[in-house]
Image: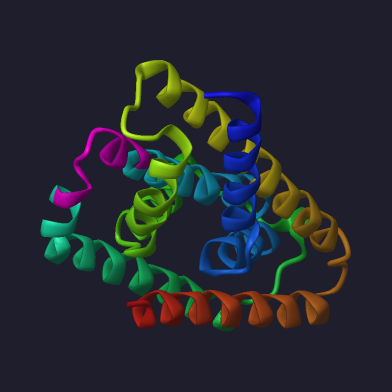
Amino acid sequence: MDLATILAFAAAFFVFAASPGPDNMTIIARTISSGPASGIAYGAGTVIGILVFLMLAAFGLSIIAAKMAFVMTLLRYGGAAYLIWMGIRLWTAVPVVPELQPVSDRRGLLTIFATGIALNLGNPKMPLFYMALLPNVVGASLTSAHLGILIAVILVVEFVVIGGHVILAGRARGLLRTPRIVRRVNRAAGGVMIGAGVAVVATR
């Protein structure tokens, strides 16, 4: 795999990862409503889901994933329901300025992390992306070295994309200084999360 091929894959994956969608909207909403740790936890979950599909595609197991459509559907709907539920909670939450809002506990972050994994494992577009792209990147054979390079590229791209969304949302969170503003932002973030959940359910 030469440098030009690696850069082409990196560019294609960056466009895929940075495009507006439920995951990025949820990362922003979680960061604004509960702080950077919450946004990072969800983002880390999405990365695990992405890497799982990469491994399936790399070892020719995408066909197996396709035959597990029922399980994938359960994961997708379960994750979407959680997003909608969290969005409703945000919409109805008592406004608290960030400095006084308790930091999410470890259990809460693990739940958010698991939701990110579930939604990505239930994303039917993920295996299609890899099945369409990998043959053009590595050809008929995929060595462990190639797989390591692809994983490294994905991690770097996701670090930039997730980190960028968390930083921007974190700066917006710093503007929250009155309960009135917090209420408006909570409702906006809640609406985004509900919309993200609905978008996940509507995905075919």
> Eyeballing the image, is 51 above or below 120?
above
Q: Give the x, y percent position of residue 120.
A: 38, 56
Q: Which residue shows up at 64% across the image and 74% down it?
A: 189
- 100 sits to left or right of 91: right
Q: Is residue 164 visible?
A: yes
Q: Position of residue 196 (x, y in %)?
A: 50, 75
- The residue at the point 37 percent across, 50 percent down is 117
- x 42%, y 55%: residue: 129
Which image quarter: residue 7? Answer: top right
- SS majority, magenta: helix
The segment highlighted magenta reads 54-63
Side of 171 where 64 appears, left or right: left
Q: Residue at x 60, y 61 (%)?
A: 24
**Residue 67's quadrant in the figure?**
bottom left
Where is residue 87 shown, x and y percent of the image? Answer: 51, 76
Q: Is residue 186 above or below residue 166?
A: below
Residue 78: within the magenta? no
Q: How is the image coloured?
A: rainbow
For the question of whether residue 109 can be seen, the reply is: no
**Label total for image:** 0
> On the rendered image, what quadrant is the C terminus found in?
bottom left
- In front: 3, or 92? 3
Q: Is residue 54 above or below residue 66?
A: above
Q: Is residue 57 magenta?
A: yes
Q: Position of residue 119 (x, y in %)?
A: 37, 60
The answer to which of 143 and 185 lies nearer the viewer is 143
